[in-house]
Amino acid sequence: MLLFCGVVFCGCKNKGEIEKISKDLTCYNISVDFDVNTKTATVITNIDYKNTTNTVLKGIKLHLYPQFFEKGATKTVVGMTNMNNAYPNGLSYGDFEVEKVVSNGQDFEVTYEGEYNGILRVPFATSLMPDKRAKISIESTLTLPNCLHRFGYGENTINFANFYPIICVFEDGEFVTDPYNSNGDPFYSEIANYNVEILADSNCVVAGTGEKEIVTQQDGKTLTKFNAKAVRDFACVLSEDFEVISKIWKDVEIEYYYFNDENAEKSLQAGVDAISTFSNMFGRYPYNKFSVVQTNFIYGGMEYPNLVMISDDVDNFDDYLNVIVHETAHQWWYGIVGNNEYEFPWLDEALTEYSTVLFYDENDSYNMTHKEMVDAYRENYSLFVTVYNDVLGKLDTSMRSVDEYATEPEYTYCTYVKGVLMFDSLYQLVGKDNFISSLKQYFAENKFKNAEPENLISCFSTTCKTDLDSFFESWWKGKVVIR
């Protein structure tokens, strides 16, 4: 996700790789019947789950992120500084209810756990051994809030993301159940296969993760099917106002969905250039589809596999293109190489934002330079720290988990802005060739997996033939003085 908080952030090889990776993964088969008028939906999530852990499981746990959009939730879904922008027509709340849970053909009582019932626990009738599979079916109903967020609707679009129960990552002998947080993107998931059907008003155009097939139905509704293999999430955006244009880069179809853009061709080209540049820089984009989607959204943009949301509220066109590039870079850092975005938000966000800086080194026509961007980050960061210290007291500049930041601006400056300065310091230290080679290695070793900071450090240390643990640690812990 790209945040704007007081600073402007100036038949193929692919298919063969995806087919190989996607074999024997957990599969989500999701059916959605959406009522555009009432902004309500019934969702049936059928999961063919494979136990990829080394543990005998008595059940699994799933995140229910829509719970936090309800009235009475223990946390707000946006920070206080963005509340008015998120709710242009006043506070609005969603609703989410699990109606039925079936595990291997047996009905079970709906059992919630965690903060504000944000976790669904689904038991197995008999313990599930490693490498064995289980069939789980979850029926739910939901109502979207009038909120310009990842789960909500605005004047032109309906953002339909994080709407279904998604399995918690199993790590160190337990499921990771961190709750939703207004800072950043508090998500963590494994790659899986998705088959999703969206039944909605025939006037709606649907952009979504994966390859799309449209099957016209009667009674004024259209069924849109998506097939996405080896992705770690699914999201879609619906609108009656969408226009769609597209281009082909090698074997990748890049689409641009928009409703208000006088420079639509240039916006599409930014997506094409970003896919091309990052493929050459880090490793080939492995999917056949990528969608850039203009939408009503509170922040600059938001990333999902094969799809990025770009806010129509970004009124400067250069900034708009910058958001497209940033969110596209997330296809590499979060999408293909995953990580715990809750615990280590800098691992994808800082690397994505610095990848955006590197993009301009390879694309002179965008009239941005590496030095100008880094100088702007340094100036903005120093100003923020000075003002914060003068007004609120000493700022904790350590780079930490999303729940440890008291405000959104702190999260933004310590994660994005300081993160860019950290990676640029490393870039200047090891040189461009070693820096890019390290990221190529990081991508190659960790694609379709979840990486941790030590994986990144190891790749840089190996390529650069020097131990870089202390370098990264000094930045994380806030020991580095930035001038």
Image (spheres, rainbow, N blue to C red):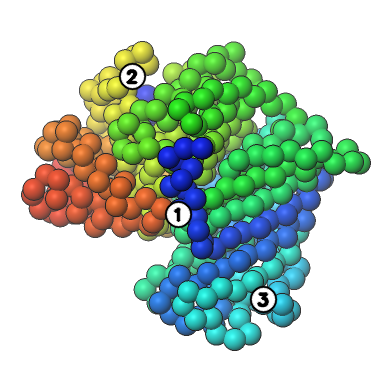
Q: Nearer the viewer, mark 1 or mark 3?
A: 1
- The circle on residue 327 is none
3D distance between C-alphas at marks 1 and 3: 26 Å
Q: Position of residue 470 (x, y in %)?
A: 13, 54
Please say whether residue 147 is visible from this viewpoint.
no
Q: What residue is shown with label 2? A: 363
> In this orientation, which residue lies closer to the viewer: 391 or 122?
122
Q: Quadrant of the C terminus?
A: top left
Residue tagged 1: 21
Q: Secondary structure at mark 1?
A: helix
Q: Residue furthest left?
A: 466
Contact (Cβ within 8 Å) of mark 1 with mark 2: no
Q: Residue 103 got which mark?
A: 3
- How far apart are the two marked residues, 2 and 3, measured between alpha carbons? 52 Å
Q: Is residue 442 above or below residue 177?
A: above
Kindly report which numbered mark, 1 or 2, lies closer to the viewer in this rendering: 1
Query: Tags 2 and 3 in contact by the CB under 8 Å rule?
Result: no
Relative horizontal placement of residue 84, taking residue 79 as reference (left or right): right
